[in-house]
Image (tube, grey):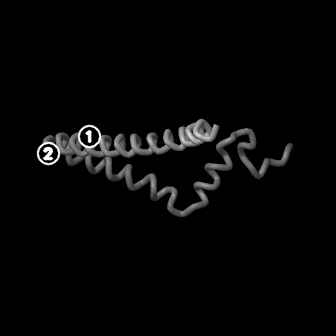
Amino acid sequence: METPSPNPMPMCPMAETCKGMMSKPFSGFALAVPGVTFVLLGILIVFEPRIVAWVMAAAFVFIGAMMLMMRSFIRRIGRKFQEPTARGSQTS
């Protein structure tokens, strides 16, 4: 009988990543907090359906803010890519 490998899944590329995540103490906590929050929010919505409107409004505000941040980030990246070409055309 063959001796088992110390790595249970040597062919899995995510094995090392998962092993590193599980060795950190807060990795499970970081997943539990949103899970518990969603469960509690779901229970609150069952008892008070008007909360759905507030949750949707908060989601729209959050998504809109993220889109504006992404817009400025993409514009900054675009400027960085255009700067070398603009400098090269001015010097010749």
Q: Going 23% across and 40% down the picture, which residue do you hit?
A: 56
Please, what secondary structure does the residue beneath circle 1 have? Answer: helix
The kind of residue tagged 2 is Glu
Residue 3 spot, x, y in % from top left: 83, 48
The residue beneath circle 1 is 60
Q: In the rendered image of this protein, does residue 92 appear above or below residue 35? A: above
Relative to 75, is 89 on the left or the right? right
Residue 18 spot, x, y in % from top left: 61, 49
Residue 82 visible within the image: yes
Q: Going 49% across and 42% down the picture, which residue do you hit?
A: 79
The kind of residue tagged 1 is Phe
Task: Assign the C terminus to one quadrant of the image.
Answer: top right
Q: In the rendered image of this protein, does residue 50 appear above or below residue 22? A: above
The residue beneath circle 2 is 48
Please, what secondary structure does the residue beneath circle 2 have? Answer: loop
Residue 59 spot, x, y in % from top left: 27, 42
